[in-house]
Amino acid sequence: MAPHPFRLDGRTALITGGTQGVGAAIAQAIAAAGASVVLHGLRDDAVAQATLAACRDAGVRCELVTGDLADDQPAATERLLSQIDALGCAVDLLVNNAGVFIDEPFLEMAPERFQRTLQINVAAGFHLTQALARRWVESGTAGRVLFTGSINGFLAEPDHVAYDCSKGAVAAMVRSLCVALAPHGIRVNSMAPGLVRTPLTNPAIDLPGFADWMQLHTPAGQVPDASVCGPPAVFLLSDAAAHVHGQTLLVDGGMSVWQQPDMPEHWPGK
């Protein structure tokens, strides 16, 4: 019997920023699909251990590596891959999920914040993909790469200039990496969430009226938790997406296609 096209059995996935939020949701979905998982996080803490345990509950091997991907590249990548090599894990799926939002208003933006945003959100994924792709080409491995983009790569928000810039760069990089790597049998795609609940977004979502406002601007009328990002990520990494190359799948409840909703009669301030 042919393997199920949505399964990832026999694969090993590295998920950067995989200990919480969207990364943890992706990691748990990948583990549930049968792949071994290497979680990357900034530190080994209670949150990381909880995600590690949740992935192991799927009955697959799961390991944790740590490091700051904003450190000098490509040295930070080399240190990360050295940890993985020491564990004996042969990674053939890469999820470049690590990201940061530390924006200030544009006119007040410190250069250090802009640089750190680009280092983590863009450069880290570039260097990790390059390092692993070199290994895959040499070994003849049909590797698969998934970036976590964002609706902010397509739509702008006030006081999000560095973040929007970084996610726009991710969308462009996915297209370019497709052209560079598809001839080697390596697939590169992106999954771009809209607003979902994570430990980083919850403080804003829980402000009075904010969730109602965002639900109004989403055709599906929902601000879901990060678990909605897991199955689309598995799809893009699986054989079911064998002919999907260089694409960004928006997981946003339709927010990106709606110019502007009509304001309801009862809406405050109308």
Image (cartoon, rainbow, N blue to C red):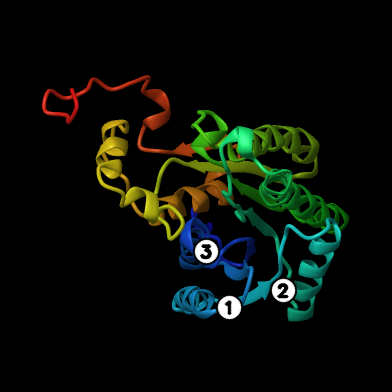
Helix, strand or loop at mark 2: loop
Q: Position of residue 186 (x, y in %)?
A: 73, 46
Please tell me how crowded label 3 is: few (under 14), some (14-19), or many (20+) other residues with Cα within 10 Å.
Answer: many
What residue would you read off at disc 1?
Answer: 61
Give the crowd class for mark 1: few <14, some 14-19, many >=20 residues within 10 Å. Answer: some
Contact check, label 3 and label 2, Cβ < 8 Å? no
Quadrant assignment, res 268: top left
Q: Upstream in the sequence, badge 2 or badge 1?
A: 1
Dot 3 falls on a residue whose secondary structure is: helix
Q: Which residue is mark 2?
A: 89
Question: What is the x, y in percent for residue 260?
Answer: 33, 21
Q: How many marks?
A: 3
Q: What's the residue type where badge 3 is placed?
A: Ala
Residue sitting at the far front? 108
Instruction: Tell me which numbered mark, 3 or 2, is placed earlier along the sequence.
Output: 3
Kind of residue sitting beneath label 2: Cys
Q: Are marks 2 and 1 in contact (CB under 8 Å)?
A: yes
The residue depicted at 31 percent of the width and 49 percent of the height is: 207
Q: Is residue 126 above or below residue 92?
A: above
- Residue drawn at 70 percent across, 51 percent down: 116
Q: CA distance from mark 2 to mark 1?
A: 10 Å
Quarter of the image where one finds residue 67: bottom right
Q: CA distance from mark 3 to mark 2?
A: 16 Å
Instruction: Give the residue number, with chain letter if any, for mark 3.
Output: 27
Quarter of the picture holding the C terminus: top left
Q: Secondary structure at mark 1?
A: loop
